[in-house]
Image (spheres, rainbow, N blue to C red):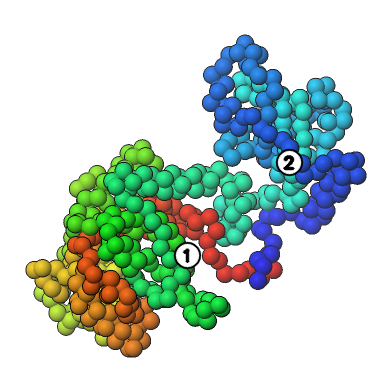
Amino acid sequence: MVDNAPIPGEESSEQVEVRKQKLEKLKAAGASVYPNDFKPNYSASAIAASFAAASDEALAAAPQDIRVAGRLMAIRRMGKASFLHLQDRRARLQVYIQQNTVGEQMYGLFRGLDLGDIVSVEGHLFRTRTKELTLEAHEIRLLSKCLRPLPEKWHGLADVEARYRHRYLDLMVNPEVRQVFEKRSKIIRSIRRFFEDRDFLEVETPMMQAIPGGAAARPFITHHNALDMDLYLRVAPELFLKRLLVGGFERVFELNRNFRNEGISVRHNPEFTMLEFYQAYATFDDLMALTEELFVTLAGEVCGGLQIKYGDHAIDLTPPWRRLSIAEAIVAHGGANEEELGSVEGLRQFCARKQLHVDLSASYGNVLVEVFEEVAEARLIQPTFITGYPIEVSPLARKNEKNPALVDRFELYIGGRELANAFSELNDPADQRQRFLEQMEARKAGDDTANPIDDDYVRALEYGMPPAAGEGIGIDRLVMLFTDSASIRDVILFPLLRPQRS
């Protein structure tokens, strides 16, 4: 269904009609109303960078044919002279136009322009009496008519859903929103450079898979007509990336989309971007150090330092970061004692005492993780590596040598949110097959997020996968952290929303 509901604050259909009539008048006069022959030779930001410090004499000697293009965001008409603000991809530029310079016919064209129109301007630079760098127009042309007036009341929380639904308007009128996505692009560039500098190879693995795997999540299902078979949008690239370890690519990473057929919230979007990387001859301890190094690099390049603000919190990314086991986190932040956490019955007593609503019929490991999420997760504000995960919730991770009920795994929490998940990889094919069989039993019992058996992956392990460690980092949540954004929708250009009826 096409989402064609009116935008809050959008002007009336009568005003839209007036703008359409202006466009028709231009057509009737023989004007090219959507020309594609204009070539700017400066951007607004380039003008500021080149001429911001120029004297009046230097401006007089500057090029007289400066050509810019952009969207009209403000017009101040004063009879036969006017000021306007032109916005392009980076910045705004003030333009001055007077009838004596451009002539009566062209000034008449200018009078027919509206806010939101995309125009070209050619002229020379000067400074106004208030010393603002300004382009005096010798020529102005309409390049694209804005037929719908920009909403007047666009800023503020009241219009937040409309901003997500009509992101093009959000980007057009809210510069701070564009800055978020410029930072996102910078973060992704920095991540690629970070891993390439450490001899990782960027790869691409299938988005459509015959067997969904690599994460406990419900997949989206589609159908391939020519092969007459169901396929699944991937929930994670993990099993394919580890096949590459088997094939001899000892350091690989992928930055791409995952799809999970689950709920939507301020932390979750069904389509999201994930970084996954795998390193042969490394352990999960090695990846803790590498993760600290990555975040420190990103903070320096994007935020200018290791002290960042997130919501009401001041976060210090200076290594080394705190390390706690799940049990230690529950003791520190949930008020449990170690004896209560040693058995299912003890956990049940703790949940009753704290009035926690968890599934007490689940296994010990599952209950332990659920209790952690209830009492500790939101309190992990400063960077914290959580370790000591039970084997029941880690079907692809290597058993801990000292305690085989646990695995060598960590999750990273910052600002009360999980940002990364990593573990030393399970490379024993017999152990992996047994874990898959246990997952299948869970599926039969009704857990539709449990991994099915991937026989080809087990076959790959039988050829020998080197000891390795791997990690996944949610890029959207990472961008939220480095841009101080409260919702995942603030960092995804076009988040999924329920269709709005008109």
The location of residue 99, given as percent across then percent down, is 82, 25
Q: Is residue 463 above or below residue 449?
A: above
Residue 193 in which image quadrant: top left
Judge whether residue 114 can be spotted in this image: no
- Residue ranking furthest to the top: 57
Residue 297 in which image quadrant: top left
Quarter of the N terminus within the rendering? bottom right
The 10 Å Cα crowd at callout 1, few under 14, some 14 to 19, many 20 or more, is some
The location of residue 276, given as percent across then percent down, is 34, 59
Q: Which of marks 1 and 2 is in front?
A: 2
Residue 271: give its label.
1
Give the residue drawn at x 23%, y 57%: 280
Question: Mark 2 — residue?
Answer: 36
- Residue ranking furthest to the bottom: 444
Circle 2 SS class: loop
Which is nearer the eye, 231 or 101?
231
Give the residue drawn at x 38%, y 81%: 448
The 10 Å Cα crowd at callout 2, few under 14, some 14 to 19, many 20 or more, is few
Give the residue drawn at x 68%, y 29%: 67
**Kind of residue at disc 2:** Asn
Which is nearer the eye, 411 or 380?
411
**Kind of residue at disc 1:** Glu
Residue 42 in which image quadrant: top right
